[in-house]
Image (cartoon, helix red, strand yellow):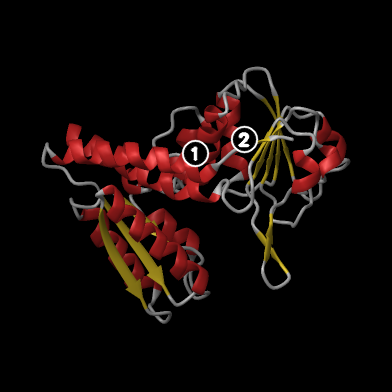
């Protein structure tokens, strides 16, 4: 059986380190500040925002919450972002997605100052990541890299297959693996003979958003499997993008769903906010 990569435990360790560094930074008169903006009443978004607020409190990070009604106009949201860009107490701005349909997400994300873009979605930060000089790294991919580091996965010369090409996970994590000298194949739902490509991989990162699309017998013996997917099947069951039980029989290490990548995303959001505050303290 594969070694289980415990995202909860890894994230807890990172959050303790963030708490300690935040306490040290406060001695110099700088308190890290994260502004969280939620527009509307999406139930999942409300849960995520609540988790982020609690995580900030535990780490000693100042959380500035803005919960707006679903009929908030795009102009009103952009005005709030402009205000937060100029607020010296704020080191990171997070606008919870998805936004209501009448608001242009691209316009909103591009309005956030690249120096406060703790999600790493601004084109400036995407460009810096692509050229190997990142300022902010997107939280979920950043967490994935920390997990690989934790299990001692040296990516130099290794074959990494990423299944999923989203701007949030697939593309950025492929760039991060390239920066670690891996040979990266970026696949997706239309890739021909996906099974053959996965079977050749030393590391598989599944982020396609389809329940158990990556079959267990596709996994190479001893490979590391990072499953980013979280899909609800039936009333209560949650499954990843990888057929877990069968994959765990072959993999060297594998993330569970839930309890794998999920906890890392919030930990790395806090890490990005702390790093932004540390840069402010040096200015």
Q: Residue at x 19, y 52 (%)?
A: 89
Q: Is residue 126 visible?
A: no
* Residue 255 location, quadrant: top right
In front here: 110 or 190? 190
Of pointers 1 and 2, the one earlier in the residue sequence: 1
Element marked by disc 1: helix
In the rendered structure, find residue 142 and report the number of the disc placed on it.
1
Residue 38: x, y in percent?
Answer: 39, 68
**Looking at the image, residue 84 lies above or below residue 101:** above
- Residue 174 in percent (x, y) is at 62, 35
The answer to whether residue 236 is visible is yes
Residue placed at 50% from the left, 34% from the top? 146
Residue that appears at 30% across and 52% down = 58
In percent of width and height, residue 149 lies at 53, 28
Q: Percent from the top left, x then y, of residue 56?
A: 31, 53
Position of the C terminus by quadrant:
top left
For residue 96, side relative to residue 54 (left or right): right
Left or right side of 206 for 149: left
Foreground of the two, 108 or 22: 22
Q: Is residue 29 above or below residue 58?
A: above
| Screen quadrant of the N terminus | top right
Question: How many C-alpha atoms fall within 10 Å of the one at disc 2: few (<14), some, or many (≥20)?
Answer: many
- Crowdedness of circle 1 by 10 Å Cα count: few (<14), some, many (20+)? many
Q: Which image quarter: residue 18? A: top left
Q: CA distance from mark 1 to mark 2?
A: 11 Å
Left or right relative to 168: residue 275: left
Q: Secondary structure at mark 2?
A: helix
Say which residue label 2 marks.
Answer: 174
């Amino acid at each position: 059986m594969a070694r289980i990569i415990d995202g909860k435990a890894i994230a807890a360790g990172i959050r303790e380190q963030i708490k300690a560094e935040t306490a040290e930074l406060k001695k110099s008169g700088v308190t890290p500040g994260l502004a969280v903006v939620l527009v509307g009443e999406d139930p999942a978004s409300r849960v995520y925002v609540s988790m982020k607020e609690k995580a900030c409190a535990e780490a000693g990070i100042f959380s500035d919450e803005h919960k707006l009604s679903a009929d908030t106009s795009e102009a009103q949201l952009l005005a709030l972002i402009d205000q937060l860009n100029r607020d010296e107490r704020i080191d990171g701005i997070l606008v919870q997605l998805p936004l209501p349909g009448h608001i242009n997400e691209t316009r909103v994300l591009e309005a956030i100052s690249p120096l406060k873009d703790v999600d790493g979605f601004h084109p400036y930060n995407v460009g810096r990541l692509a050229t190997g000089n990142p300022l902010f790294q997107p939280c979920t991919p950043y967490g994935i890299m920390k997990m690989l580091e934790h299990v001692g996965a040296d990516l130099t010369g290794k074959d990494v297959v990423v299944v999923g090409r989203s701007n949030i996970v697939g593309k950025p994590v492929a760039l991060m693996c390239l920066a670690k000298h891996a040979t990266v194949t970026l696949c997706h739902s239309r890739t021909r003979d996906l099974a053959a490509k996965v079977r050749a991989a030393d590391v598989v990162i599944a982020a396609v958003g389809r329940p158990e699309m990556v079959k267990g017998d596709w996994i190479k013996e001893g490979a590391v499997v990072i499953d980013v997917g979280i899909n609800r099947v039936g009333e209560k069951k949650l499954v990843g993008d990888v057929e877990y039980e069968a994959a765990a029989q072959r993999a060297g290490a594998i993330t569970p769903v839930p309890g794998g990548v999920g906890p890392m995303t919030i930990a790395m959001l806090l890490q990005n906010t702390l790093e932004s505050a540390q840069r402010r303290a040096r200015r």
